[in-house]
Image: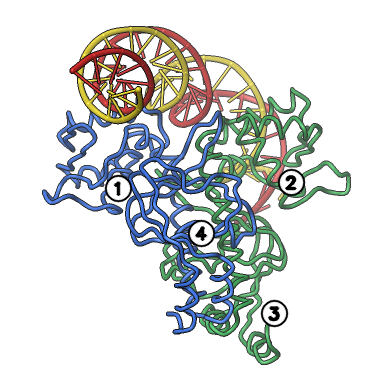
Chain colours: A blue, B green, C yellow, D red
Amino acid sequence: MLTAAERDQLRSNARFVHFKKNELIYLEDENPKDLMILFKGKVKIFRSGVGGRSQIIRIMRPIQYFGYRAYFAREPYVTAASAFEACTVCKIPMELIEQFLRNNGELALFFIQMLSIDLGIADQRVVNLTQKHVRGRLAESLLFLKETYGLEEDGATINIYLAREDLANLSNMTTSNAIRTLSNFVNERIITIDGRKIKIIDEERLHKISRIG
Amino acid sequence: MLTAAERDQLRSNARFVHFKKNELIYLEDENPKDLMILFKGKVKIFRSGVGGRSQIIRIMRPIQYFGYRAYFAREPYVTAASAFEACTVCKIPMELIEQFLRNNGELALFFIQMLSIDLGIADQRVVNLTQKHVRGRLAESLLFLKETYGLEEDGATINIYLAREDLANLSNMTTSNAIRTLSNFVNERIITIDGRKIKIIDEERLHKISRIG
DNA sequence: TTAGAACTATGTTCTAAAACACAAATATAT
DNA sequence: ATATATTTGTGTTTTAGAACATAGTTCTAA
């Protein structure tokens, strides 16, 4: 998508940064400087709300772009990002990206499309998180994690190692409710759990629970 | 922002359309074709969720652009739009916009910035709507309506004529709860109501209620 | 201009989910 | 390896807000 000259410039300005598990990548209210490209690992984008209660807004997988929205909106970050697990991130100064973009319609459309997709997801998420009940929201999150990170070799275990608290923050519920509802799903033979490993037994049921709310 | 040639093309492809009060402008699942520019009137962008319950996602005032997100995401609309009151909308084929955009970095950045701002608002809205209590959500909506549509000549009455149901759908609550909470605000001398006209008496209190949730 | 539909208001009941409490099991750091 | 912190699991209590019921009021269309 870039010209040879652009690629050269990119290479000399890109920096690779490693983050340890649970390390913060950027903070709320900070000033956005770089486009971040997740090369390895898993990242959560979250925001703390009433009484510091945290809500996971987006989760990233390799290779996805993040951290650029606030820069384009000309405002500080309204979210924070941290590493679910050890990560490798490539940082590129947003000034450079913006400069490329002014002369490269394809690149501009690429960003427009990413933003448009994310905005559509956010619009739907507002309704899902506010209107669905706890079971529906948790079922949706499990399916969402499966879509995002895929399954392990057994073709059933969701390929992410998440604390119940994170699962709760993703699904807009308390940790107790995540734990309790997860147990219910186990009793109903929809999933099995082994510590933090979650295996999906009856995906169709999950879809149904998510759909009816 | 456009060249003379672009402006000519724009003029010959733009269509002005009028919508009556409560008329639908576009529907969920429809295919996006046009960029819409609201010239006159007020528009709600909404989505129906569990059991057909509607949630207002965004509200538009003149002169704002809408209807383009789904086209850029290459997907059907996930929301619908309707007129709060009689509206004049200018429609421009998205194909034309996209063509302009490929050669016009400024225009591309304009769309990128709009999308980025809206995505930031959506991210914050998710947290506000899920974590704040009814009073906080309603207070926030009232302030939001004031910011968007401004005040009448008296410098206190919010310049929009909204049904309680719309206020509820904006604030993620039942109509009864919107009515009840509005009454409470009146008793606490935070607002006064005269039918659908809402006058803000104590804006500071509203801010505080919105902030604490 | 009047009938009926839609909206507003308020009281009452019911329930999902938060809050709280505590024990058991795991992680993690020293 | 062992102490300490964190996470997980369950039972109990409390509560915000939905659901329901009903009546008065205001639109709106024939």
User: Which of the two discs, 1 and 4, sits closer to the camera?
Assistant: 1
Of all chains, the one bearing label 3 is B
Marked residue nearer the N-terminal end (2 or 3): 3
* Residues at marks 1 and 4 on the same chain: no
C-alpha separation, residue under disc 1 versus residue under disc 4: 28 Å
Which sits in the foreground, A189 or D28?
A189
Determine which of the numbered discs, if any, sits on residue A145 in the image. Answer: 1
Marked residue nearer the N-terminal end (4 or 3): 3
User: Which of the two discs, 2 and 1, sits closer to the camera?
Assistant: 1
C-alpha separation, residue under disc 4 versus residue under disc 3: 29 Å
Q: Residues within 10 Å of mark 4 (few under 14, many from 20)?
A: many
Residue picked out by circle 2? B146
The answer to whether mark 2 and mark 1 are in CB contact below 8 A is no
Number of numbered discs present? Answer: 4
C-alpha separation, residue under disc 2 versus residue under disc 1: 39 Å
Residue picked out by circle 3? B1
- Relative to A73, is A139 on the left or the right? left
Point 46% across, 66% down: residue: A14
Residue A150's x, y, as percent? Answer: 23, 53
Determine which of the numbered discs, if any, sits on residue A136 in the image. Answer: none
Residue picked out by circle 4? B80
C-alpha separation, residue under disc 3 versus residue under disc 1: 42 Å
- Relative to A165, is B33 on the left or the right? right
Q: Secondary structure at mark 2?
A: helix
* Residues at marks 4 and 3 on the same chain: yes
Q: Amino acid at mark 3?
A: Met
C-alpha separation, residue under disc 2 versus residue under disc 3: 30 Å
Q: Residues within 10 Å of mark 2 (few under 14, many from 20)?
A: many
Point 54% across, 45% down: residue: A27
